[in-house]
Amino acid sequence: MEILDNVSSIVHNAVVYSTPLIFAALGSIYSERSGVVNIGLEGLMIIGAFTGAITTLATGSPWLGVVAALLAGILFSIPHAVASVTYKADQVVSGIATNFLALGLAVYLTKLMFQNAAQTATIKTMIGKWKVPGLGDIPYLGKMLFTAYPTSYLAILLALLSWYVIYKSPFGLRLRAVGENPAAADTLGVQVHKMRYAGVMISGAFAGIGGAVISLTTTSNFSYHTVSGQGFIALAAVIFGKWHPVGAMAACLFFGLAQALSSSAQVFGFAQYVPVAFIQMLPYLLTIFVLAGFVGRARPPKASGIPYQKGER
């Protein structure tokens, strides 16, 4: 029975840890499918986590915090879109600049608003867990899968919806076209720059929500280490999932399981056999192994990372 309880807790925690990764990974897919590499996911998640936290503290509503984080993610993604699409700057450099700017701005505003403190005040009104009626009462399985934060259900639903949008809708067809062959799409009347702006801004919206999910479900505040590399893990999940929404979601669940095992190893006493630092490294080591094993075989959209100049082929 104790083993089943432990397994149930690990799987439950894997879903919790994977939720912000799913949001961020879905955002990255929209951006890369349009042909723009968004290395700035980490920074967009930081802005989302910060905005979600301070909005919730100000209004008492975590859902308003999520909406504010979504809007903040969109606004903060616009400079990257302008630099990458309009001015055709190096997309990797622009994304890295987004990460540095977001972290510096969020930490500065936190210190300014909370008397030079390193973190915000504790959020008292958090997003609570939902239990699916009937299914949530099933022994072990109910706790494992059917008692979760509503944001987890929302992330899974949006992953399935994104599959439909990207592969079955006219918008998705145009998005993929500008990411594969923007010159051909342009000759057919598709506005390449407009679609790429849309992809980057959708990316910002999803990443902003992902950051807010962290501060409003697990950490209960914002500090400089709230996101702690989750944006980069989401990027790895996109590559692992081969730029497919459902594949990326499965990869995020895998990385979430790695984080859950890392946390459980400390709780269950494995720290007396293995140094805590090595246990905490597990999710990041798996990220490196996945990138080393799959980045050479996974094929991104052909025009991803390549600025488009009208008239060029």
Image (cartoon, helix red, strand yellow):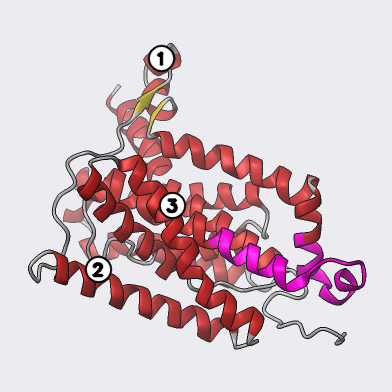
Q: Amino acid at mark 2?
A: Tyr
Vertical order, 213 against 184 (above or below): above
Circle 3: element type: helix
In this view, 277 is above or below 209: below
Q: Residues within 10 Å of mark 1 (few under 14, many from 20)?
A: few
Majority SS type along the magenta span: helix
Q: Residue tagged by mark 1?
A: 138
Q: Earlier in the sequence, mark 2 or mark 1?
A: 1
Mark 2 or mark 3: whose residue is earlier in sequence: 3
Is 148 placed above or below 232 here? above
Q: Which mark is residue 209?
A: 3
The residue to which callout 2 is attached is: 224
Return the residue nearer the eye: 1 or 260. 260
At 42% from the left edge and 22% from the top edge, which residue is drawn?
141
At x 47%, y 66%, the residue is: 75
Q: Is residue 286 visible?
A: no
Reading the chain from its start, which is encountered first: label 3 or label 1? 1
Count of numbered circles in the view: 3
Dot 2: element: loop
Q: Residue furthest left?
A: 115
Residue 155 horizontal/vertical position (percent): 51, 42
Q: Is residue 27 magenta?
A: no
State the extent of the magenta-drawn residues as a range: 175-203
Amino acid beneath label 3: Ile
Q: Is residue 271 left or right of residue 308?
A: left
Quadrant assignment, res 99? bottom left
Q: Quadrant of the C terminus?
A: bottom right
Marks 2,1: beta carbons within 8 A: no
Of the residues shown, which amino acid type is indicated by label 1? Ile
Q: Is residue 120 toward the left or the right of residue 17 in the image? A: left
Which residue is at a point 37% across and 79% down the rendered structure image?
A: 101
